[in-house]
Image (cartoon, rainbow, N blue to C red):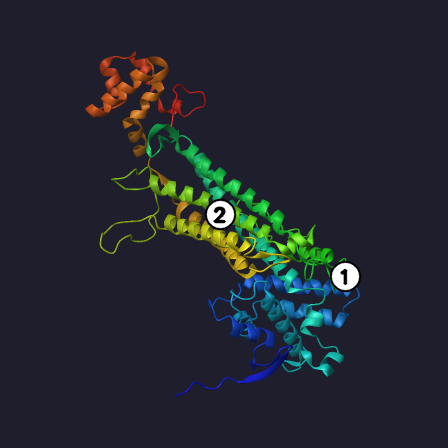
Amino acid sequence: MPPAAVATRIEKDTMGEMTVPADALYGASTQRAVENFPISGRPMPFPIISAYASIKSAAAAVNLKLGRLDKARATAIQKACKVIASGMPEHGGWQRHFPIDVFQTGSGTSTNMNVNEVIANLVCLAKNKPIGSSKDPAYLKAGGVHPNDHVNMGQSSNDTFPTAIHVAAAAAICRDLLPALNKVAVQLEKQAKAWDKVVKIGRTHLQDATPIRLGQEFSGFAAQIRHGERRAKQALGALCELPIGGTAVGTGINAHEEFGKLVAEELTQHYESDEGVREKGAGGQRYSGPAFREASNHFEAQHAKDAVVETAAMLKTIAVSLSKICGDIRLMGCGPRCGIGELKIPAVQPGSSIMPGKVNPVILEAVIMVCCQVIGNDAAITTAGLGGVGGILDLHVAMPVMAERLLESIELLSRSCHVLTDKCLVGLEADTERCAALIEGSLAMCTSLVPAIGYDRSAALAKQAFKEGKTVRQLALEQKILPEKQLNELLNPWNMTLPGGEGSAGG
């Protein structure tokens, strides 16, 4: 049987008529974009749509304050924006009404008009008017809301879309990424403290080196994550400067001169009061919402997207840090019998369909793959930001893909930090016996003998010990190179992990 016909309605825009699904809350401009861009099947991420709702709500409040919009229309727009921010479950979900592909017009004009149309039609429903009434002269004369004249008042796609990127990314960093990074850092700091007495062999170039404490290694991991927090906060500084108020090309045409400043203040208040943004971190810190401000130069803010490129670079660096931490833990835990085996990685699932009893470091592998994706996203964002690609004269025209990739990186890093902590780090154990055995067998122990017997003699001792299958201590005692008491003092692994300890080590 042929599929049932879908009920439709006719909508109009400046280019003519369009056939739109009867129950869709968007209009002709959105439908044109749906038909023009059947590319990835991926709609613009909801954080962008939600950020847009907050921007349109703030703009309505400011236009009311400036006397450009009456109270009834401003209130109606704000109520519609709350419906969108809720995810629109009563309307079949947000994706039903925001279907435009990520790969669309580079300025995000299609998404901006999509938001304008949905808000206007939500107001129609609230006023018991049919969907599509938003351009009816009689309806508008009676106080109706027009998608361009009222919802988009004092705005352009060219300043609202980049503002939505900044707002969505900044909110996600405050709400999700910073608490997640703090959670990882707190756990690593606990392990650094707990394992401060566990001495193990150091490795440089993947070869045996002088001893190091397991706690010292984990303190380095924790410091990497704390630096990641600092980098995320640095990115916030760039993202919190908003292009709103610049309208078409940065000159602010059709917007009140105070519009950008006041919208930024409204957005700051909105996100500061958002309890989701103010979530308490793992260490007890409370993360406040982003403090937005109007761009100091609207021409830079709209003609380029350097703030997004900078943020992606910071996220890439965090990913590189995580990959180093996960890679090192994976190496130290390899085995369990025929590898390094200094760490016992939690077993969370069977590791092989053919080798019974095998357990793999799957959590670490998953996080490392996330890091690969974040690095790839940075490459896409960087390329999109290039002059002649996205940055062309008086407008940036590759913003939608930058928005999607940036938000995905923040989300992936945030979620993977929780998974890493909960599924791996919390259950991670040190094999102290294995650590001690590997130290004693290491030829690098001869390093601490250098001040007493010299570099050349120490090197000869190490080579002979390796050839004969003995430890440095065994051979040194046999040859009576030094008095036993002095030898044991020099070969004390703990002393070798302290600043100023005897011995010298190259790469």
State the residue in front, 194 or 316. Answer: 316
Image check: 191 left or right of 92? left
Q: Amino acid at mark 1?
A: His
Quarter holding the N terminus?
bottom left
Q: Residue at x 25, y 40 (%)?
A: 337
Is 460 in front, or is 188? 460
Residue 273 horizontal/vertical position (percent)? 65, 56
Q: Amino acid at mark 2?
A: Lys
* Residue 142 in sight in this render: no
- Around disc 2, counting alpha carbons within 10 Å, would you say few (fewer than 14), some (14 to 19), or many (20 or more)? many
How far across and how far down the image is residue 354, in percent?
A: 22, 55
Q: Quadrant of the C terminus?
A: top left
Q: Is residue 397 left or right of residue 195?
A: right
Query: Which residue is the site of mark 2?
Result: 316
For the question of whether residue 77 can be seen, the reply is yes
Counting residues from the start of the chain, the first of labels 2 and 1 encountered is: 1
